[in-house]
Amino acid sequence: MIPEYWRNFINKNEIIGCEFEVSEEDDLSELGADLKIMNIEQCISEATECYPGKAAIIEGYVPVAMCLTGSGDYYYIKTSEGENGSLYRIYHDAVNGEQIATNGIEKVLKNYASLL
């Protein structure tokens, strides 16, 4: 479920549990972001036990980080993009049944590795 390239990225860079801030200027959605990289168990739990994670995984998005500002939104990578893909925010209230609303997904970074 969690791509090997993501596992390699977080382990190689030793960023599990690390916090990152993305300024409004650097955030493609212009909101800014404060996030914490989750460990593999947390990623799996969010993807299999919670929404929007359960809906997101069906659409090829894997949860990788949690919001630190209290919004309840999580951050995702899209498996079809492969290594060095984008980082996305999926709003926790954007799920309608088993689907995520079109405006419920925003690209935060063009390349998740730019967090470093």
Image: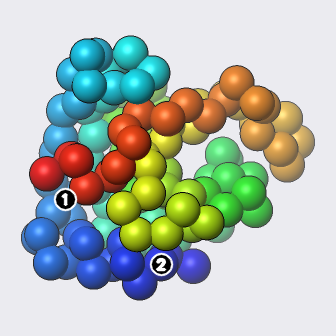
Q: Residues within 10 Å of mark 2 (few under 14, many from 20)?
A: few
The residue located at (26%, 16%) in the rendering is 25
Residue, disc 1 = 17
The residue located at (67%, 62%) in the rendering is 60
Residue 17 locus on image (x, y percent): 19, 59
From the viewer's perspective, tell me whether residue 13 is left or right of residue 58.
Answer: left
Q: Secondary structure at mark 2?
A: loop
Which circle's residue, 2 or 1, is located before the other in the chain?
Answer: 2
**Distance from label 2 to label 1 (Cα)?**
18 Å
**Residue 102: numbered disc:** none
Residue 18 locus on image (x, y percent): 15, 54
Residue 91 locus on image (x, y percent): 58, 31
Residue 26 locus on image (x, y percent): 26, 25
The residue located at (33%, 26%) in the rendering is 27
Where the N terminus falls, by quadrant?
bottom right
Residue 45 appears in view: no
Residue 19 placement: quadrant: top left
Q: Nearer the viewer, mark 2 or mark 1?
A: 2
Against 50, is 106 above or below?
A: above
Residue, disc 2 = 3
Q: Residues within 10 Å of mark 1 (few under 14, many from 20)?
A: some
Residue type at mark 1: give it: Gly
Residue type at mark 2: give it: Pro
The residue located at (44%, 49%) in the rendering is 86
Against 107, is 3 above or below?
A: below
Quick one: 75 or 29, which is closer to the camera? 29
The number of numbered badges drawn on the structure is 2
